[in-house]
Image (tube, helix red, strand yellow):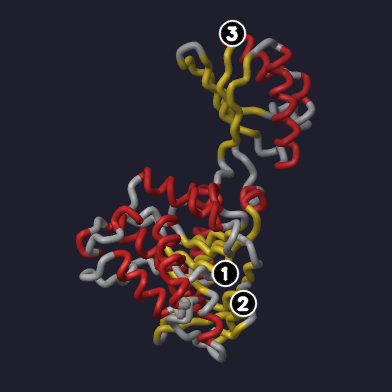
Amino acid sequence: MITVDHLVKRYGAHVAVDDLSFGVERGEVVGFLGPNGAGKSTTLRVLAGFLGPTSGKVTVAGHDIVEDSFAARASIGYMPEAVPLYQDMRVAEYLAFRAELKRVPRKLRKAHVDDAMERAHVSHVATVLIGKLSKGFRQRVGLADALVAKPSLLILDEPTAGLDPNEIREVRDLLRDLGKEHTVLLSTHILSEVEAACSRVLVIARGRLVAQGTLDEIHARRRPLGLELLLRGDEDDVRRALTESPGLAAYASDAGKPALTKVRVESRGELLAVSAGWARHVSAADIERATEELVRALVSASIGVREVKDVGNRLEEVFAELTASANAGREAGDA
């Protein structure tokens, strides 16, 4: 659906996008991540046909975005970060105008507008002037604009900016539904949105691609540093299971160092909150098996296991590590 091949975008001496290549397949919902200034919005503007590339090639739905711009843009519903709206038009009036610009046939226009308003949850403000709406509702109108022509590809730049928590949850649900009918490329700073809605992730820093893959593949780039557990049982039994489990002993080093270090047990009402770190000598592959052994040991000791989660390989932590290392490498090269 999207093919980006060695894309470069310069503003004078500043390189905003630097030799960027990636692809998005039809039917995917892909998260496009990067820190401020990474080149996300610039890349999306090039993909949407709003900016021309300095060099490289971009194709959308098989059409070159430069040489066959109208055909490429006919497949795209684009929602920019700062949605430009006519403040003195009413919501339904504005969307009908946008549908006409996007060449939606006259006989289908009203149905398209009504469907877009319903999906973006703005039907109840259809007759309200856009200038009277809150920022959150203006964002929703921008989303309805992207949907009104029923494009096969949606490019959404920070679609939840300015929304309250309830509105963000509604947009997340909408994104999951949109993925059933559209290809979606989503830029956002809220990583929980990516985890909730996206099947794959692209990460850029300083205009360069630093990682891509499924969420599991991105998580796997960083070895978990420890475990957090929520347990029910006797504290002495818990400590014994954590430190003396025969299963965990298999992952101790030759020097006899334990697999788990810095074990801390705290009372939390009727439950015990446990945190522990994995020793450096325990590999990522061994951590998965050792975690299973640990849970087995706890259950065998009649300890109730309420929750087990890794620490240190959450998307936020992997993202921070990827972008920090890319920035450090680029700055060293510049120096």
In-front residue for pair 263/132? 132
User: Residue at the front extreme?
Assistant: 107
Q: Is residue 211 above or below residue 230?
A: below
Q: Which residue is mark 1?
A: 152
In-front residue for pair 4/34? 4
Does residue 81 appear left or right of residue 58 in this picture? Answer: left
Residue, x 26% and y 66% (percent of image)?
90
Residue 67 is drawn in which quadrant? bottom right
Does residue 126 appear left or right of residue 330 in this picture? Answer: left
Does residue 138 appear left or right of residue 257 in this picture? Answer: left
Badge 1, how many Cα within 10 Å: few under 14, some, many 20+? some
Q: CA distance from mark 2 to mark 3?
A: 61 Å
Taking the image as drawn, is residue 195 in sight? yes
- Does the residue at mark 1 contact the one at mark 2 (Cβ under 8 Å)? yes
Residue, x 57% and y 69% (percent of image)?
152
- Pair 1/2: label in front: 1
Residue, x 48% and y 69% (percent of image)?
206
Residue, x 62% and y 51% (percent of image)?
215
Q: Which mark is residue 61?
A: 2
Q: Which residue is mark 3?
A: 234
Q: Percent x, y for residue 59?
A: 60, 80
Q: Is residue 82 above or below residue 216?
A: below
